[in-house]
């Protein structure tokens, strides 16, 4: 039985403001502008340039490098030079995905689609006529996945994002349109909008890998060690009775994207934590297959200061 | 439905579904704010609002209107009582 709820109480204005779990100085519009400025470069050359930049990055970001080394060790058991190679590969893979995202975000959908080599499990999406919650994570090109799925589902898609991302980076990656609308978590009543959208048969896209640092988190073993995951998507599913659909967009060895849509499942009332465990198992499977596309550059097991 | 009865029913929902401490019920009034990050509010987060909205639907027997901007109705116990009252009157 789920035991996530704690007593509601009178608060001071600082209560519940949410814990800031991770930030780095490079998530700035300048870098997005620079990446977008290279969108005219042929993709093959652009990705080669992105890989070069990615190779330089670990030395500029020692804290992030350490976090990635820790994650790669846990995901793969690698040590020594193999671990070093995997760690650098995370940064190069990220640079390519980032370049593709920023380059294509303001371009016609056909350009994004041309980068996709294969879509696995698309029949699962086609079978779902009700509202649904698309669950993804910071693995591969998750933002591209959202736009691609929105096109496939032919239904309005509400993508839930952190408010700071939306404010600073909206112009580069948070562009509404083509059936996608970005919704920030800044207002607690946003859940009412999402509830209504799901009831209208629309799609809600959420990241299921970053805890909020609030009572809405649940602790689940991730690669053998407890990590915190957000419970909100599973609560929404159980309350509206809509399925959760894990979906990922991953870069393959030929630099084409493969979209993987896993088996949908629904969270039963009172069984939200169990549903979260199902999601984490699906996430582990993908990360085991594509460890260098794990793009959480912080310690996922200890994400909060103090 | 009378305002007082709606307010009492909302308090019941807070206790039963959101585990509000019953001994603190006398502190609540129509002026009590609901969302977190507001001084003196109940500090409800997004998950609490899901619980509250489902509780209201079950208790009062209507579906919360999805075509409206609901945020204003869920700002305080007073605005929520007004909203429930108007929805009950529409039935």
Image (cartoon, coloured by chain):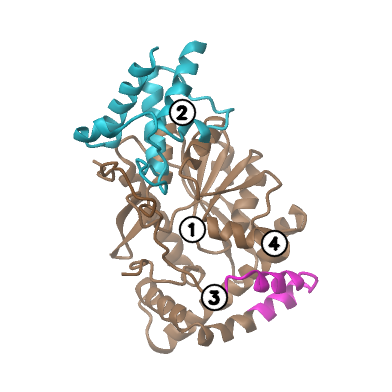
Q: Chain of mark 1?
A: A
Query: What color does chain B have in the rendering?
Result: cyan
Residue A266 visible? The answer is no
Chain shaded brown: A
Give the magenta range. Answer: A26-50
Q: Give the number of the mark in front: 3 or 2.
A: 2
Magenta-span inclusion, residue B78:
no
Image-quadrant location for residue A102? bottom right
The residue carrying mark 2 is B79
From the image, state whether disc 2 or disc 1 is nearer to you: 2
Label 4, secondary structure: give it: loop
Q: Which mark is residue B27?
A: none
Question: Is A47 left, or right, of B52 in this rendering?
Answer: right
Q: Under tag 2, what secondary structure?
A: helix
Say what secondary structure mark 3 lies in: loop
Q: Is residue A154 left or right of residue A250?
A: right
Parent chain of label 4: A
User: Which is more foreground, mark 2 or mark 4?
Assistant: 2
Q: Position of residue A246 (x, y in %)?
A: 48, 50
Q: Residue at x 41, y 23 (%)?
A: B57
Judging depth in this view, the residue of A290 and A174 nearest the camera is A174
- Residue A122: image x %, image y %? 58, 46
Residue B28 visible in this rendered orientation of the protein: yes
Depicted A66 relative to depicted A208: above or below: below
Q: Position of residue A41 (x, y in %)?
A: 79, 74
Task: Give the dominant element type of the magenta stretch: helix, strand or loop.
Answer: helix
Q: Helix, strand, or loop for circle 1?
A: loop
Residue behind mark 4 = A115
Distance from disc 3 to disc 1, alpha carbons, whole Å, reads 22 Å
- The residue lying at 35 percent from left, 73 percent from top is A74
The mark found on residue A137 in the picture is 1
């Amino acid at each position: 039985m789920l035991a996530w709820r704690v007593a509601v109480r009178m608060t001071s204005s600082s209560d519940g403001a949410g814990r800031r779990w991770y930030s780095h100085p490079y998530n700035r519009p300048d870098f997005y502008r620079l990446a977008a400025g290279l969108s005219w470069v042929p993709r093959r050359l652009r990705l080669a340039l992105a890989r070069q930049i990615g190779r330089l990055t670990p030395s500029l970001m020692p804290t992030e490098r350490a976090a990635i080394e820790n994650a790669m060790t846990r995901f793969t058991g690698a040590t020594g030079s193999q671990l070093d190679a995997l760690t650098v590969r995370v940064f190069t893979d990220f640079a390519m995905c980032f370049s593709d995202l920023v380059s294509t975000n303001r371009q016609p959908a056909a350009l994004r689609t041309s980068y996709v080599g294969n879509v696995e499990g698309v029949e699962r999406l086609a079978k779902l006529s009700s509202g649904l919650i698309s669950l993804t994570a910071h693995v591969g090109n998750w933002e591209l996945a959202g736009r691609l799925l929105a096109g496939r589902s032919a239904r309005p898609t509400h993508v839930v994002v952190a408010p700071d991302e939306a404010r600073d980076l909206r112009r580069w990656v948070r562009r509404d349109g083509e059936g996608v609308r970005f919704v920030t978590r800044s207002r607690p009543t946003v859940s009412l909008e999402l509830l209504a959208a799901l009831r209208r048969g629309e799609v809600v896209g959420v990241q299921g890998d970053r805890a909020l640092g609030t009572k809405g988190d649940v602790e689940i073993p991730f690669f053998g060690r407890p990590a915190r995951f957000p419970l909100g998507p599973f609560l929404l599913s159980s309350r509206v009775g809509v399925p959760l659909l894990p979906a990922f967009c991953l870069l393959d060895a030929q630099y084409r994207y493969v979209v993987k849509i896993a088996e949908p499942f629904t969270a039963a009332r009172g069984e939200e934590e169990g549903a979260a465990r199902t999601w984490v198992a699906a996430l582990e499977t993908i990360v085991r297959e594509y460890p260098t596309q794990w793009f959480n550059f912080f310690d996922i097991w200890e994400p909060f200061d103090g | 439905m009378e305002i007082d009865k709606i307010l009492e029913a909302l308090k019941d929902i807070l206790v039963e579904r959101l585990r509000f401490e019953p001994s603190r019920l006398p502190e609540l009034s129509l002026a009590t704010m609901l969302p977190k990050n507001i001084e003196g509010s109940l500090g409800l987060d997004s998950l609490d609002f899901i619980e509250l909205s489902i509780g209201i639907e079950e208790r009062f027997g209507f579906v919360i209107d999805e075509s409206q901007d609901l945020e204003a109705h869920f700002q305080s116990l007073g605005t929520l009582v007004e909203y429930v009252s108007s929805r009950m009157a529409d039935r």
